Amino acid sequence: MKEYDIIGRMQEVLSKLRGKRNTEVYEYLDDFISDNLFMPDDDPYDIANEILECDEPKPFPKVIRDFIEELYTVSFENGNPDAMNAIGALYYEGARGFDQDFTKAVNCYRIAAENGSRQAQENLGYCYYYGRNMPVDYEKAFHYFALGAFDGHLISLYKIGDMYKNGYYVEKNLKEAFLIYSRCLDTMTDETAPYAAGPVFLRLGNAHLNGEGTEKDPKRALFCFQKAELFLYDMIQNGSYMYKKSLEAAVEGQQKAREKLGKELPGREWTFDD
């Protein structure tokens, strides 16, 4: 266990926060010190996570960003590979004032994955799938997504569905893709819905709208697009800004579904008795 003066570092951060608009972080650190909450076996990883929940969704000043990264680094050095993955995620998303830097993100993910972080393996799948500062490699993307899917990660599972839909590395199979998206929805829990439901409903909406792997059903498509919009709004409001295009697609999908439904309405004027 690496020696780390958590209280001393918190006091330094507090002294630099006076006058800044991060009241929740200030109160959290002040209460932490006053109550002497830190125990020898506490993980700085948990403290960093708590700080990230403060003052949402405002960007943090440099003093807080540096402290969060420092806490995760200490946690990683003490044996927690998910802490290095957490640093990578901050740079990948460019959230809370961190600069978006795919090179730093990939380096962190690789270190975390090599040390056993399943989440980092899934995140590497994304980087290979989209070519985040590296050549696109669908074979490696499929490999990392499969590791995540076997471990119950719904994002990994629906990305495998995307690979079947597009014929990336595997043979194109729209029915298989639809079944995978449906499986995601069937196994979704209240815990996983906030980060997986929006993208899954969006994919199911497109499948029902266009008859991809299933029968065309514009009414079901409209329902899925509406659900996708609600979940995606929450994701973006909570800092997942990279889903803005998905939100636009969910709104556009609703319009397309309504147009198709409108054409199915009876071609007569309704009359009402007085």
Image (cartoon, rainbow, N blue to C red):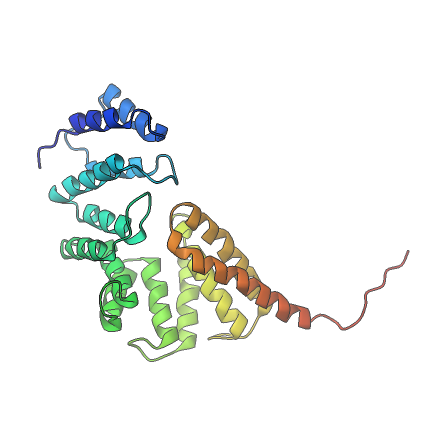
Q: Nearer the viewer, residue 50 or 133?
A: 133
Image side of residue 59 versus residue 115, left or right = right
- Which residue shows up at 25% across the image and 66% down it? 128
Question: Is residue 263 visible in the rendered structure shown here?
Answer: yes
Q: Is residue 168 above or below residue 149?
A: below
Write down the quadrant of residue 186 in the picture: bottom left
Q: Nearer the viewer, residue 113 or 233?
A: 233
Image quadrant holding the N terminus, namely top left
In the image as oriented, which residue stretches furthest toward the bottom? Answer: 171
Percent position (x, y) of residue 203?
45, 65
Image side of residue 248 versus residue 2, left or right = right
Image quadrant holding the C terminus, namely bottom right
Write down the quadrant of residue 20 in the picture: top left
Percent position (x, y) of residue 224?
52, 61
Question: Is residue 150 visible in the rendered structure shown here?
Answer: no
Q: Is residue 142 above or below residue 44?
A: below
In the image as oriented, which residue stretches furthest toward the front? Answer: 19
Percent position (x, y) of residue 160?
33, 68
- Which residue shows up at 19% across the image and 48% down it? 84
- Which residue shows up at 59% across the image and 64% down it? 255
Percent position (x, y) of residue 155?
34, 59
In the image as oriented, which residue stretches furthest toward the left? Answer: 2
Write down the quadrant of residue 151 in the picture: bottom left
Q: Nearer the viewer, residue 257 or 115?
A: 257
- Which residue shows up at 52% across the image and 74% down it? 210
